[in-house]
Image: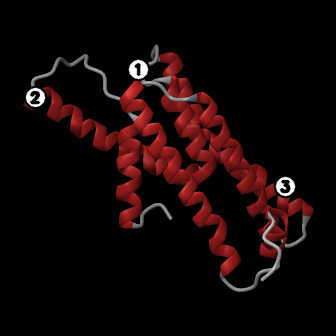
Amino acid sequence: MSNLSTLSTLAEMTTMTGMTKYLVIPIILWITSSVYLALMAYSDVKTKEIPVKISIGFGIAGIALTLFSSMIFSYGSVSYFFKSFSSYIIFALIPGAIVFAVAYFTGQAVGYGDAIVITVLGILMGGKGVFSLVLYAIFIAGFMALVEIFILKKDKKFEMPFVPFLFVAYVMANAAGFLF
């Protein structure tokens, strides 16, 4: 068995043949996204706050994994590496930027914490995946809001944390195989 240090393991991954190297990074990103979303959903339900430091840590981890993935798939071409990495990051940040704008212009009808979570998920999942996830979550949250208003007779101004709906949508979409 080879040396188990992190750097040697990463170096060995770049020389892997077959499907192995194409599956390792997506699996790591899936696990990272799952853990992050579960932590944020729990925090949003319990405290109605999103821990920014944890989000920054997961965002940095996502950028590092994306950098590494871009290095593996660039096949030695520096220009392809920068092109693939920069386009991925730009498109990954668009859904979060849209939610930040909505939060700003609506006086936080959608909270900045939700925007932070969506931004980090964009880094971890890519723009297309997180955009789909947000649409699923909005549908689920809307359905639950209708239940709360019409069946449970709550006031129309009640607030619901949004991140748990992101988590439910993530679990459902992954179970159905829609995101990956």
- Within 10 Å of disc 2 (Cα), the crowding (few <14, some 14-19, many 20+) is few
Left or right, residue 179 beside residue 20: left
Disc 1: which residue? 109
Q: Residue 82 got which mark? A: 3
Q: For mark 1, give the secondary structure.
A: loop
Mark 3 or mark 1: name the one nearer the start of the chain.
Answer: 3
**The N terminus lies in quadrant:** bottom right
Residue drawn at 77 percent across, 58 percent down: 84
Q: Amino acid under label 2?
A: Leu
Query: Is the residue marked by circle 3 packed among few (<14), some (14-19), or many (20+) residues within 10 Å?
Result: some
Q: Position of residue 130 (x, y in %)?
A: 51, 48
Q: Secondary structure at mark 3?
A: helix
Question: What x and y, as percent, mark residue 178?
Answer: 42, 63
- In the visual, does 155 lie left or right of 48? left
Disc 2 element: loop
* Count of number-bearing discs: 3
Depth check: give the residue in front, 26 or 149. Answer: 26
Tag 1 near tag 2, CB within 8 Å? no
Q: Which mark is residue 65?
A: none
The residues tagged by marks 1 and 2 sit, at their Cα atoms, a distance apart of 22 Å
Q: Give the residue displayed 69% in from the left and 48% down from the top.
A: 61
Mark 1 neighbour class, 10 Å CA radius: few under 14, some 14 to 19, many 20 or more: few
Read off the residue under disc 2. 152
Q: Position of residue 94 (x, y in %)?
A: 61, 40
